[in-house]
Amino acid sequence: MNMGYYLGVDTGGTYTDAVVVDGAATKVVGKAKSLTTRKDLSIGIGGAVDAALSAADVPASDISMVSLSTTLATNALVEGQGGRVALIFIGFDASDEARAGLADALKGDPILRFEGGHGHAGQERAPLDLARLETEVAALADDVVGFAVAAQFATRNPAHEIAAREVIRRVTGRPVTCSHELSANLNGPKRALTALLNARLIGMIDRLVAACEQHLQRAGIDAPLMVVRGDGALISAAMVRERPIETILSGPAASIVGARWLTGAKDALVSDIGGTTTDVALLKDGLPEIDPEGARVGGFRTMVEAVAMRTTGLGGDSEVHLVTEGLEGGLRLGPRRLIPISLLAVDHGPMVDESLDRALATEVAGEMDGRFVVPMTGTAAGLTAREATVLARIDRPMPLAKALASRLEAAALDRLVARGLVMLSGVTPSDASHVLGRLSAWNSGAAEKALRLMGRRRNGSGERFANDPAVFAQAIVDQLTLQTAECLLEAAFAEDPAFAGHAPETLARHVLLHRGLAHHRGVMQVSARLGVPVIGLGASAPAYYGAVGTMLGCDMILPEHAGVANAIGAVVGQVSQRVTGSVTSPAEGRYAAHLPNGVEIFSDLEAALAKMEATLRAEAMDRAARAGAVEATLLADRKLKEAEIEGRRMFIEAQITVTATGRPRVAHDFEQKE
């Protein structure tokens, strides 16, 4: 039987990768990279896909499955970007807004508070005012890209969230995310946060999936499109459009799967450096660890099941900051991603060169010298008059000084960057690598001018940071080495039970550790090293990670296809869907099964448990089918919580989880060919 070929695509902040794997998933037969094109993602996807098919010498008609992983959702949360959304907050009080980082996540987006919600047993606490809801969401419809709905104890009874969703869809036509759809766990504010972030990401992920589908159609590829979830499992493109939050850590999860496939390593730290982030996770006994508390990205702890991953705003395109405090000063990288000067100059060379040359011709270094701003696509709803004025001025890539009429507009520009409506361009480690000759794909001349210009800035003692661009470039790369090592050390301390209860961030930067890594020999002799190998992934890993391995005293594994590990991981995974439900006891001899369509009361515990498990089995199979699985198998798990009272065992609560796992569906014609 001809199984055809699998096509994996990974869309990152800087590059889109594509890889063609044989139908038995045993070898890479073609791979390619293309720059991610933010304004029209289909261009970058198309460039990578077409080049990979050409390299593999495989016709489009032979592709039987396509799978997509992405870091776009992760990057958006790390950089604080995403569309403007409204949160419908039902049954909570003001103190709940301060929990789980919800107030920080809102960032000024509207919140509508309503009486209502349910109690822990699923009983209605107060009616929901649907007439008022209809009026208020109608007024907001043009100013937001979507709505998030969170009601108290919605996992015990989702009636108010469902009612609100129906009203919002009917009145506004906008996408709606309900918190109970994303998690069955208690903790309303954390569920609200997860729903809010999901709503913010819907437009971005929808554009990505649509761009991929458009090119597949143009290329003549008629195969199912899957997307990698944050735990490494695959789901259908249709499902991910409703639940884009599940793709946070999609790219890193795919890289873990890809690292295992490429190296066969069972125990290692996997470190994946991209343009925007560095993602570190532990591979233990051949499997990635799943974060029991939910994925943490960009400072937010969500309720999304994902690989236990430490994501840091550190990458090849991280912003280089000059630290001017103290006499000598220093450098710091990230967390914001910039368009490297060397990359901007590929398409806009004359404008970039003219601006840099003019700045270099003066003796005094200006604050905005060597900085540029580039317009992006996106909805401009909800902008202030000042923000709208600045955005209208940025009608093409231009020097930053031309975009701002006064210092008062700097805050407005920051808001436009956070909304993803514009991007800044400036000096990055990628530029430093071009100056040092480690990279040559972009405009090295522009990078050299930008580093020369930035190096002229003064430290606390009045001295220039660097007179030689090459010296400055090496300092930037050394800082990247140090911050990468600290990312790996944080992950190592977090995973080592001997250091439980101690902050990994503090331990990773402790002077004693760094003296130990340098094998200090004085009155005290100190030695330290990382105890597991590191698998370095990402296109720039070979350029940077040798020095990281030396600093940490560990084996550094750089596999042959390290630059496309995410795309490989995208096509060698399984489809998996997990659903959870609870049974509680509101009174002695009464058992409440909290079903998706409401609460059902039983007088017999086993009957309640059986009803819940049967409902979850059906739901898991349905979700697995919608996620693109065939021949799914089911695994059920019951966790009962009991207490002993006066010598009697009393039932408190049960949580039942059903997991459906299967292989992804491939194109039908390949299933039937001999």
Image: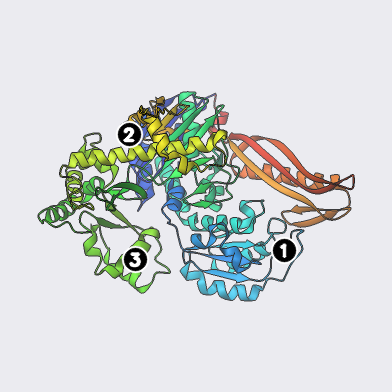
Q: Which of 222 and 338 is in front in this view?
A: 338
Tell me which residue sits at (50%, 59%) in the image: 105
Q: Which residue matches tag 3?
A: 411
Decide if residue 189 is on the left or right side of residue 84: right
Label 2 crowding class (10 Å Cα cut-off): few <14, some 14-19, many 20+?
Answer: many
* Visible residue check, residue 430: yes
Q: How many marks?
A: 3
Q: Pinpoint residue 354: horizontal percent, then vertical percent.
A: 14, 54
Q: Which of marks 1 and 3 is in front?
A: 3
Which SS class for mark 3?
A: helix
Q: Pinpoint residue 72: horizontal percent, then vertical percent.
A: 43, 48
Q: How far apart are marks 1 and 3 (CA)?
A: 41 Å
Which numbered tag is attached to residue 544?
A: 2
Q: How far apart are marks 2 and 3 (CA)?
A: 34 Å
Which SS class for mark 2?
A: helix
Q: Earlier in the sequence, mark 1 or mark 3?
A: 1
